[in-house]
Image: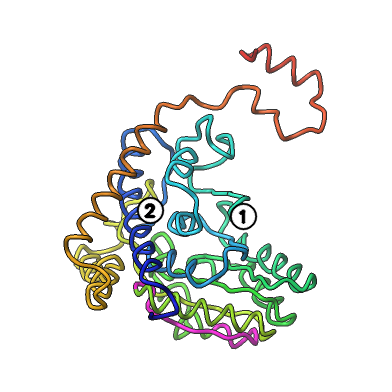
Amino acid sequence: MRSGLTRQNLLDAYRIMLLSRWLDSKALGLHNQGKIGSYTSAAGHEAIHVGSVYGISKNDYIFPYYRDQGVLLARGVTVKQILNRYFGNASDDMKGRDLPNLYSYRENRVFSNSAPIASNLQISVGYAMAAKMNKEDIIAISYFGEGATSSGEFHVALNFAGVFKAPCIFVCENNQYAISVPLKRQTASENISVKAKAYGIYGETLDGNDFFAVQTAVSAARDRALRGDGATLLECVTYRHSSHSSSDDWKRYRTKEEVEEWKKRDPLVLFRDQLFAMSILAPESEKRLVEDAQAEVNEAVKSTENIPPPSEESLIEDVYASVPKSLQDEVLEFGGN
């Protein structure tokens, strides 16, 4: 089977991409209804998210950024877990302590990310170096937008990874705009991947809307890393279908014509057509997958949106080995039990 994946692998991958797209649509609706906070859309990035996870091992470390819900789904995080995070409710693994799109799922080896761009890159290199020193056959993979390549964190991470041949993969999700700043105002380089040459690592630009292109490139990068050949910078060229975030208006800096032209390369449509051509998917089964994905997300919303917020006591849990009495008294004073 193409890229070493089974028929079931490919059907599962398509199902996850459908889940991510429908969850994205529902999350935007929940934000507009005032039910969740600021939201960062993932529509258009599904092939990068799912294809990359299908190119690594379940034991590898993942360092996402705030647009990577498809990565979480592909790694095994459930729709309900993600929605609990978006609502910040009592079932949220992070107890509502952070913004909706700042994820952390330790059991899935998905590390906590933060809003400052590229802040996850150096940490991923550190974990990759620790794995190398411990002689573990695992790598670290980190994700970021093209805007992050203008940051000092990007330089530090790639320079260190190049010098010490860290077994890591840097996935640049180049969606053409860093909020409203177009790529041509971001860099004078011919592309993003060419920057890898300065750090002495392998770099490649690929179609970020093509699941197979992403999966193959990531798998090859992982093999290089485990051989001791060092890090890889993969520039996955794509386009976000909506605004940068729920507080942004894309119509102020993009034309409708440009958006519609890019949507002709919708990663879900491209992957669906590839699976049709490979006789893995048929129109009837594709229709069922779409309906099942929508039903799963809709059911998850119903079961999570009415879960109450975390208790007042949770504010001081997981912070102290022994909670000071003064804080215990404050919690009691302001409504705790």
Residue 198 highlighted magenta (yes or no): yes
Q: Is residue 146 visible?
A: no
Q: Which residue is mark 2?
A: 41
Give the x, y percent position of residue 95: 58, 34
Q: Is residue 320 left or right of residue 53?
A: right
Mark toward the start of the polypeptide (2 vs 1):
2
Residue 217 versus residue 21 in the image, above or below = below
Query: Which quarter of the image is occupied by the C terminus?
Result: top right
Residue 306 highlighted magenta (yes or no): no
Give the x, y percent position of residue 75: 51, 58
Which quadrant of the view contains residue 152? bottom right
Q: Is residue 71 visible?
A: yes
Tell me the crowding category of disc 1: few under 14, some 14 to 19, or many 20 or more residues within 10 angstroms, Cα based.
Answer: many
Q: Image point 24% across, 67% down: which residue?
A: 263
Which quadrant of the view contains residue 27? top left
Q: Which residue is mark 1?
A: 111
User: Which portion, as a residue range, is magenta?
Assistant: 195-209
Residue 279 versus residue 286 in the image, above or below = below
Q: Is residue 321 left or right of residue 60?
A: right
Three-letter code for the amino acid on which mark 1 is drawn? Phe
